[in-house]
Amino acid sequence: MEFKHISVLLEETIENLNIKPDGIYVDGTLGGAGHSYHICKKLTNGGRLIGIDQDEAAIKAATERLKEFEDRVTIVRNNYCNFRQVLDDLGIDKVDGILLDLGVSSYQLDTVDRGFTYNEDTLLDMRMDQRQSKTAKDIVNEYSEFDLYRIIRDYGEDKFAKNIAKHIVNARKEKEITTTFELIEIIKAAIPMKCRAVGGHPAKKTFQAIRIELNRELEVLNDSVDSMIDSLNDEGRLCIITFHSLEDRIVKTRFRNNEFTCTCPPDFPVCVCNKPSKGKVITKKPIVPSEEEIINNKRSKSSKLRVFERQA
């Protein structure tokens, strides 16, 4: 299957990166290189793009897509949380811009045997990096009822989390749960029929929760933002596109904490900690897709772009 993915908020992201023709840029979620292609178009031979992705299919697709710019592109298969090690290995200290597009690619969603979909019956997988041994099946069959409840409540924000977790544990006592449709039927049984008729697919939130847990998505994001800001040159920018409230909340909080770094008690008349601000949040409110973009790409509907500018 061809790696296809429509890049969301493309023009807005490229504009907010403030690309310098001879700058160094990192795309930490390279995917099919939709954003990266347009970054490269703005670079001269003195510029450079470092593309990082953990998905083998994305690496192959991006390598082909960026072939015309191969003199200024370095592609690395890794998780963006290791971006600092990637830069160190390349002898790069600071960069002029970093991009994260945190959405699951259309390719991953639409490739049935990747196990992300709840529209086809396939093995429970959901690994972003298929070198990883642990899969969604392991979470469903091995996590305690409390841990299942916790992740479905926290990561899926599903009000039926407790009942879904209970139904999963009861079902796996009879037999191992191995496929998406097996899990979907269990989830459906845990949700009242009148509630299943509204709010989209009844399994959507649970699948999201399992995917986030398996790939440590929120943990990786939370642990990476500060280091990325520290790795920017003066006036360099970090652009992050999120797709649900948990990601957006992390980005908003980390950006704010890097803008307002003072740790003095609020009743102190003057700052004595002398911790300098690392920069400023460019987007006081997140940039969201236009109605036209949502019509053309329904998967862009929940996307939000936030931008931070480093100030040395």
Image (spheres, helix red, strand yellow):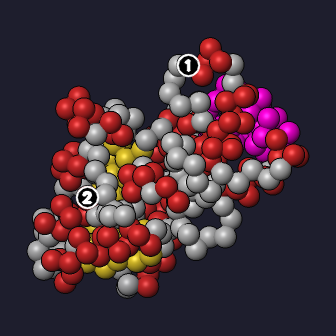
Q: CA distance from mark 1 to mark 2?
A: 37 Å
- What residue lies at 21% left-to-right and 45% top-to-bottom? 12
Q: Earlier in the sequence, mark 1 or mark 2?
A: 2
Secondary structure predominantly adopted by residues drawn in magenta? helix
- What residue lies at 37% left-to-right and 64% top-to-bottom? 1
- Judging by the rendered image, the residue that carries numbered circle 1 is 197
Q: Nearer the viewer, mark 1 or mark 2?
A: 1
Image quarter in which the C terminus is found: bottom left
Label 2 packing within 10 angstroms: few (<14), some (14-19), many (20+)? many
Q: Looking at the image, can residue 175 be seen?
A: yes
* Residue 219 is a magenta residue: no
- Please, is residue 154 above or below residue 115 in the view? above
Total numbered circles: 2
- Judging by the rendered image, the residue that carries numbered circle 2 is 35
- What residue lies at 62% left-to-right and 70% top-to-bottom? 132
145 or 252: nearer the eye? 145
Q: Amino acid at mark 2?
A: His
- What residue lies at 51% left-to-right and 23% top-to-bottom? 199
Q: Secondary structure at mark 1?
A: loop
Which region of the structure is painted magenta?
A: 147-170
246 or 161: nearer the eye? 161
Q: Secondary structure at mark 2?
A: helix
26 or 63: nearer the eye? 63
x and y percentages locating residue 90 in the rendered image: 38, 84
Quarter location, residue 150: top right
